[in-house]
Image (cartoon, rainbow, N blue to C red):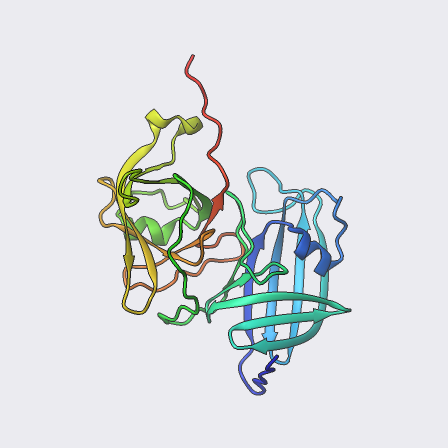
Amino acid sequence: MIICSQAGAKPQTYVGSTPPHAVVREFFRISLVDSIDFIRWKLEINSPRFKLVAKYGISKPGTPGFINEQSVAFEGQLNQSGHYYHLEHEGKVLSILEINQNVLHLLDRNGNMLIGNGGYSFALNNINPIDTGAFNLKAKQSVTPNPQVFEGRTLCRDLAIQLGLEKNEDCNKMKWYILLYMDTLTGNPSYFMMGGMGYRKETMAKGSWQIITEQSGRILYRLSFDGWARPLDLLKGDDNILFFIDTRGHLLSGDEDFSYTLNRKTEEYPRVKNN
């Protein structure tokens, strides 16, 4: 492992809310049987050290907080190899990938990006994001299920403006549930379905999509829908993670509650049958 020292570099602070995956619980020394909905992070990177504060518990309905908030705080050694950070504390190691300076993503024990759910992702966001088009991943196109199912929650304002959506000023989040269908004969993108009440197909919006491979090697999923002012571009991280980008192709950076990430779901939600 190459350990890079960034002595003198300005500390960077990242925040986010993630599911309580076993890899994370082990690093925090949280029991695997404790009932936890999510963990809220504040990670300060000041190589070769880090400081971490995490709050966790059962989510309080209608609020971003907890019913039974608990917390843990500690600091430890930070080893860096390229764009990979390895946090070490009391014999435990947690690995994180720097997608760019604005967005980090937690990894499993095999170095793959952890998969979140419809409420929380495994991305951490810089509290002072910079203007950058960097993207430290090279995804590959691969054979995927049909349809591909993705879900997540993002902040509301920036995407509402980008897509020309009329949202109330108090809109703080957008929920996403997207089914990406391929043509069974050609294997090319066909159409997508999105949202829906009770996951009834008749209430889901329908649009077209395409896969674009840029000269840089980045793979975009471009979704077009009549209700949007412009197409929505999603940047492929791997088969399980998609990142929202702005009109310039830059990664969007979230806050302590929401990240601009979609997570693969292994199967569609059960359909609610009509009476």
Instruction: Find residue 9 and report its image quarter.
Output: bottom right
Residue 11 seen in the current view: yes
Position of residue 54 in the picture relative to residue 255 (left or right): right
The answer to which of 158 and 18 lies nearer the viewer is 18
Instruction: Find residue 42 and report its image quarter.
Output: bottom right
Position of residue 165 in the picture relative to residue 140 (left or right): left
Work out which quarter of the rendered image holds the N terminus and state it: bottom right
Position of residue 66 in the picture relative to residue 274 (left or right): right
Position of residue 235 in the picture relative to residue 229 (left or right): right
Instruction: List the single residue furthest toward the bottom.
Output: 8
Measuring from the top left, give residue 121's x and y in whole percent: 52, 52
Residue occupying image coordinates x 61% and y 47%: 65
Measuring from the top left, give residue 144's x and y in whole percent: 41, 46
Numbered marks: total: 0
Measuring from the top left, give residue 99's x and y in whole percent: 46, 66
Work out which quarter of the rendered image holds the C terminus and state it: top left
The answer to which of 183 and 8 lies nearer the viewer is 183
Instruction: Find residue 29 and report its image quarter.
Output: bottom right
Residue 177 seen in the current view: no
The answer to which of 146 and 229 lies nearer the viewer is 146
Instruction: List the single residue furthest toward the front.
Output: 185
Instruction: List the single residue furthest toward the top.
Output: 275
Residue occupying image coordinates x 37% and y 56%: 141
